[in-house]
Amino acid sequence: MADQSKSLVNTVELGRAIRRKREQLGLSLRDVADETKVSASTLSRIENGTGKPDADNIARLTGWLDMPMERVMGARKTEEGTDTSAVVYFPHEATPDIVEAHLRADRNLTPETAKALSELFRVAYQQFSAPGTDARARKGRK
Amino acid sequence: MADQSKSLVNTVELGRAIRRKREQLGLSLRDVADETKVSASTLSRIENGTGKPDADNIARLTGWLDMPMERVMGARKTEEGTDTSAVVYFPHEATPDIVEAHLRADRNLTPETAKALSELFRVAYQQFSAPGTDARARKGRK
DNA sequence: GTACACTGTTTCACGTATGAAACAGAGCGT
DNA sequence: ACGCTCTGTTTCATACGTGAAACAGTGTAC
């Protein structure tokens, strides 16, 4: 194998994880190939850490492993100060309210400008979202 | 453009995100290429959604974007269409990006109106947020 | 013994992502 | 007009990951 220090893909880690799970489940390479749509030959190469799988196969295999991709692809940013403290908003919340919250928290803005921007956005949003066309009426699947 | 519906990599999403950030920072393709170690030609192709970047470049670019890889690589088995995505907000991202993400996820808006609103907001935000500070990203030649 | 059904590995032709370099414009100063 | 520098795009030869198929073992049954 070449110098994978240049590659951001940790093939060895991925390969070991796959082999571990596969053997633990008592499956053959072709079984896993069938299940993941990754050919047995490619699986063999990956398990042995040779070469570098392409993006599709990494997605398929980390999906099969239930493993986060950052585990095998150099996600440089995640240190212990992880950004996993991300805040999650759900789409059904009112967008203008969310925007206002963001603007208020934005250190680049004074409170006055934040308020002004927020109101400007609110007006624009209402105009855009309900012009009478009413072309939506989506089935409200969640 | 080939049949990328079979691919698990959402090149379009990735390309749009890169172009957005790049233009917002006032950088050229070669600037970003220098910074990310992804060549300008490849960068151009990705921004235009042609082809499918390899794993290394996806890692480099999602790293540069501070974007989780799952956003552009379909790890989950989510069936088509249903956008289960809550909008994830990483605190260090720029406010216009967050707003755009919310707008895109807003089911009350068509993609076109979402885009229009987003750009309108972006312009307004830039005008409001940088009256005299002028914290422009300088692009000194090398 | 032979034959069959597995296994993991490797060969092979093919597709395609890549970066360097060439290209085509735009903008600007002289 | 020129020339120069920047921009994004596109050719081009090369490198390499891919799956199908061929290969090499290893049992197991007959």
Image (cartoon, coloured by chain):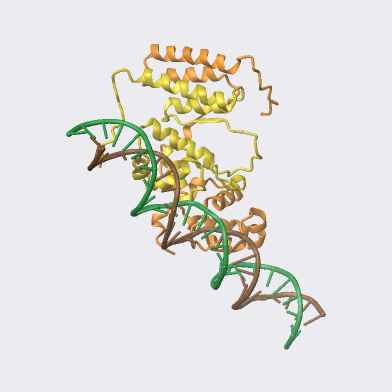
Chain colours: A orange, B yellow, C green, D brown
At 63% from the left and 53% from the top, the residue drawn is: A36
Residue B90 located left or right of residue A139 = left
Residue A105 located left or right of residue A46 = left
Question: Eyeballing the image, is A36 above or below A101?
Answer: below
| The C terminus of chain B, quarter of image | top left
Front residue of B42/A25: it is B42
Front residue of B14/A47: it is B14
At 39% from the left and 55% from the top, the residue drawn is: A6
Question: Eyeballing the image, is B57 above or below B23?
Answer: below
At 58% from the left and 43% from the top, the residue drawn is: B74
At 42% from the left and 19% from the top, the residue drawn is: B124
Q: How many marks?
A: 0
| The N terminus of chain B, quarter of image | top right
Where is residue B89 drawn, in percent x and y?
49, 29
Front residue of A21/B35: it is B35
Where is residue A7 drawn, in percent x and y?
42, 54
Where is residue B103 drawn, in percent x and y?
54, 25
State the image quarter where residue D12 is shown.
bottom left
Where is residue B14 drawn, in percent x and y?
49, 39
Residue B45 visible to the viewer: yes
Question: Eyeballing the image, is D9 above or below C14?
Answer: above
State the image quarter where residue B139 is shown.
top left
Residue A106 visible to the viewer: no
